[in-house]
Amino acid sequence: MRRLVGSTAFLLASASGAVSCPAEAETFLSCTFQDGAKYVQACIEGGNATYRYGPTGGVPELELSEPLESVAYEPWSGVGWIVWEELSFRNGDVTYSVSGSATRRPIDEDEALAGPNGSLAVWRGDVEWALIVCDEGSVDFPWSPAIYDAKREAGQCWGQAERMWSACEVN
């Protein structure tokens, strides 16, 4: 179930200009645009993925929330040096796709991520209306398996060839 949610959430801006998800939430991606004037964030809050967009330091212009089990999510394939994931939210016939990427560095055993990047694509049907790239240095993309794990726990499996989630086959 998708729903539009009103909010008076206060957003924290760091020295780099990035905005943080609420303290009780996990960040999928957050960043600013237009030299810090606007922000986007996609957060994991309880069992939901939440999208917020608006003026930095202000009340969101748009806030959408959806259960993790049903939110559109394309996970990293697990291959290559670039970790890339996308989380999409629908509002009527408009889709807001938030994506993050970072380069894995085999410097230590933790394979720390370097150079996070992010963007917001706005689609109406099959037509891309806008592609907004996050301000350099404002991206928070910590990459976590939380959404993937929630979908797996709900009995869903990712089909890399089909690029979609479906019910897991039981043997």
Image (spheres, rainbow, N blue to C red):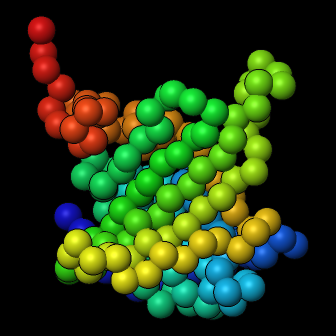
Can residue 47 be seen at all in this image of the molecule?
yes
Judge whether 37 appears above or below 72 on screen: below
Picture quarter with the C terminus: top left
Left or right, 142 with respect to 3, comes to: right
Image quadrant for the N terminus? bottom left
The residue furthest top is 171
Instruction: Determine which quarter of the picture holds residue 39.
Output: bottom right
At x 23%, y 72%, the residue is 126
| Along the viewing direction, whichever of 76 and 51 lies nearer the viewer | 76
Figure disc tally: 0
- Identify whether 163 is placed above or below 61: above
Q: Residue at x 79, y 66 (%)?
A: 137
Residue 15, image x, y percentages: 87, 72
Check the image and report above or below for 49 versus 168.
below
Residue 68, horizontal then vertical, whole percent: 34, 50
Q: Is residue 82 left or right of residue 158?
A: right
The residue under the point 82% across, 22% down is 108
Relative placement, left or right, of 143 versus 2 is right
Residue 163 screen position, x and y as percent: 27, 41
Front one among 103 and 20: 103
Q: Position of residue 87 (x, y in %)?
A: 41, 57
Q: Is residue 41 visible?
A: no
Residue in the image at 58% along x and 40% along y: 83
